[in-house]
Amino acid sequence: MKSFYDEAFEYTQEFEGQYPRPWMTDITDPTQADCLIVGFNQRNGYKVEDVGDHSRHVDALFNRNGQSCRGLYDRLNPNPSRTRINIDRLSKRLKNCGAKVLETNVICFSTPMSSDLTIRQRRAGLDVFKWLYGRILPRVLIVHGRGAAKELAKLDTSESTVIEMAALAPPAYNKWHGESESELDRIASLACKILQSPANQA
């Protein structure tokens, strides 16, 4: 049986000039994640010519061999998006209660707008997400934004408790940013309560 690392190596091969970015995390074994933060797709991509060697990309995903998820992201995106900042805010709250967090998207390819995704990107991205979800089976899925929630509803996520929340990405985020501190607290508290309860009571 192939290791998760070897599987990740196969699932993140170059596709239309990009390396798929299936997750962001600070843990070295993504299969240990118990909480996934799920968006629709990312704005900032990993162009092959910018990332370089594919092995470096995969090592970054696993935070090994001197590479790290965040280190590679920061190198390619010195000015983080508002979405990234908001995800960081939620992720920090979850980690404070002991959650093992993995941040991902239903479609792991970059486009300026989600409507710019091609049919091939959608299909390939969904294949990556279904593989990832099936290998992790997290207790909690926090899905942000209507588009992501709608897409996620088409998939079998019955092994997890799904928590839906408003979009963390502008422009939709701009409508509720004034209440974001309390809403992020609420979502994190709900997720942590589930994670801290016995599995058969979640």
Image (cartoon, rainbow, N blue to C red):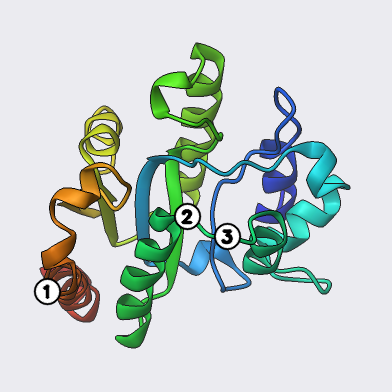
Answer above or below: position of 110 versus 161: above
Q: In the rendered image, which residue does mark 3 sit on?
A: 79
**Callout 2–callout 1 Cβ contact below 8 Å:** no
Dot 1 corresponds to which residue? 182
Look at the numbered disc 2 and give the secondary structure of its residue: loop
Q: Residue at x 67, y 47 (%)?
A: 8
Of residues 125 and 5, the one drawn nearer to the viewer in this rendering: 125
Q: Residue at x 39, y 54 (%)?
A: 83
Image point (49%, 31%), residue name = 112
Q: Quadrant of residue 79?
A: bottom right
Amino acid of disc 3? Asn
Neighbourhood count class around disc 3 (C-alpha, 10 Å): few under 14, some 14–19, many 20 upward: few
Packing grade of label 1 (10 A; few <14, some 14-19, many >=20) is: few
Q: Are marks 3 and 2 in contact (CB under 8 Å)?
A: yes
Question: Percent from the top left, x then y, of residue 54?
Answer: 83, 46
* Disc 2 versus disc 1: nearer the observer: 2
Instruction: Give the quadrant of the C terminus.
Output: bottom left
- Quadrant of res 187: bottom left
Q: Secondary structure at mark 1?
A: helix
Q: Is residue 31 left or right of residue 63?
A: left
- Residue with the mark numbered 2: 81
Q: Which mark is residue 18?
A: none
Depth order, front residue of 149/111? 111
Residue 96 vertical placement versus 142 (above, below) = below
- Badge nearest the viewer, 1 or 3: 3
- Say which amino acid is labelled 1: Ser
